Amino acid sequence: MRHPSLRVKKYDETRDIWQMRINRSVRCYFVIQGNEYVFLKIRKHTD
């Protein structure tokens, strides 16, 4: 999560959803539950 190329950031503060960049056009959304990362969605990013 701390690797700079992933560019992880908080996406939705109220629902505690995080976003990371897979590449320039794909994003992954996830939540952190204890010591586990639960992936919610992987989708194309639109500018």
Image: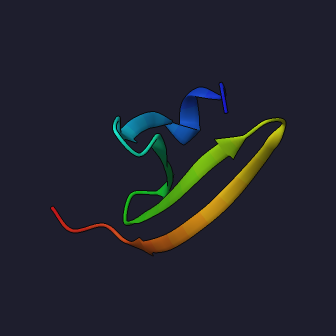
The colour scheme of the drawn protein is rainbow
Q: Which residue: 67% across, 33% down?
A: 1
Picture quadrant of residue 12: top left
The x and y percentages for residue 23 are 48, 58
Q: Which residue: 34% across, 39% down?
A: 14
Is 21 displayed left or right of 30 in the figure?
A: left
| Nearest to the observer: residue 44 or residue 33 | 33
Q: Which residue: 59% across, 48% down?
A: 31
| Nearest to the observer: residue 11 or residue 26 | 11
The x and y percentages for residue 4 are 57, 27
Please identify the residue farthest to the left as the structure is shown: 47
Q: Which residue: 43% across, 33% down?
A: 9
Please identify the residue farthest to the right as the structure is shown: 35
Tell me the quadrant of the picture where the C terminus can be found. bottom left
Picture quadrant of residue 11: top left
Please identify the residue farthest to the front as the structure is shown: 14
In the rendered image of this protein, does residue 10 appear above or below residue 36?
Answer: above
| Nearest to the observer: residue 4 or residue 13 | 13
| Nearest to the observer: residue 29 or residue 45 | 29
In the rendered image of this protein, does residue 16 appear above or below residue 45?
Answer: above
The x and y percentages for residue 5 are 56, 36
Q: How many marks?
A: 0
Is 44 displayed left or right of 41 in the figure?
A: left
